[in-house]
Amino acid sequence: MLWAMKKLKWKDYDLIFSYLDELFPNADTELHYGTPFQLLTAVILSAQTTDKQVNKVTDGLFKKIRNPEDILKMWHKAFENAIKSIGLYKWKAKHIYETSKILAENGWIIPKEEKELIKLPWVWEKTAKVVLYVLYNKPVIAVDTHVHRICNRLWIVQTKTPLQTSKLLEERIPQQYKAIAHHCIILFWRYHCTARNPKCDNCHLSTLCLYYSKNYKKCQK
Ligand code: SF4
């Protein structure tokens, strides 16, 4: 069945973000970190891995590693071993080393612009946006498959790929919600609007939701 395209109105965005804010007040990153470099490291480690898994590793590791020099002083193999429970650990270790070298040469400064951040090894657009949002409060939204799914379920975008969503999302979300959007959407997909068995019976957004229209409304007829 074809579903008519829907364009959200201001009141719809108000409903979405006031609800997300109510569900997850003071939403913040779930990655543990103490210094800007630790955040960058944790975000790089979190690619294709859960934040929980990263925290298990970094809770111990970050007692020894606070800045790029600490990584460079560590034996590469020892660093690899310390993160080996994380997917793609060899690649991540290699690129975190290379990133550390670059940052050590530049006074440990984590770049404040996306175009500079993505020059660092293994820092893609999504990683850069997480760092910009968390460290520098920039009004950006990192898009992965989950954020893509939520935004399509709620008609914020109607796109086929996360890349397409990423290109549209920041212009779609009203300015007043950009400060909270990134973390609220992440916590929403993680704990409420999950890929399987989302909590639709207990969701205030069902009137807006494409997934709900397709899967529940027709059952109630
Ligand atoms: S109604 Fe269900 S699918 Fe739709 S936003 Fe709420 S939890 Fe997600």
Image: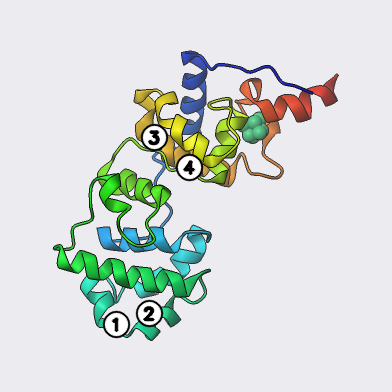
Q: CA distance from mark 2 to mark 1?
A: 7 Å
Which residue is at a point 37% across and 56% down the rendered structure image? 123
> Is residue 98 left or right of 19 when viewed as pictured?
left
The answer to which of 208 and 163 lies nearer the viewer is 163
Ligand 1 image position (quadrant): top right
Q: Which mark is residue 79?
A: 2
Which residue is at a point 69% across and 30% down the rendered structure image? 211
Q: Nearer the viewer, mark 4 or mark 3?
A: 4
Q: Amino acid at mark 1?
A: Met
Q: Are marks 2 and 1 in contact (CB under 8 Å)?
A: yes
As drawn, 14 above or below 63: above
Q: CA distance from mark 4 to mark 3?
A: 14 Å
Residue named by callout 4? 143
Tell me the quarter of the picture where residue 221 sits. top right
Q: Residues within 10 Å of mark 4 (few under 14, many from 20)?
A: many
Residue named by callout 3? 180
Q: Amino acid at mark 2?
A: Phe
Q: CA distance from mark 1 to mark 4?
A: 33 Å
> Is residue 203 left or right of 143 when viewed as pictured?
right
Q: Is mark 1 within 8 Å of ligand 1?
A: no
The total of numbered circles placed on residues is 4
Circle 4 — which element? loop
Residue named by callout 1? 74
Q: Position of residue 188 (x, y in %)?
A: 54, 40
The answer to which of 103 and 35 lies nearer the viewer is 103
As drawn, 103 above or below 18: below
| Image quadrant occupied by the N terminus | top right
> Is residue 129 left or right of 188 when viewed as pictured?
left
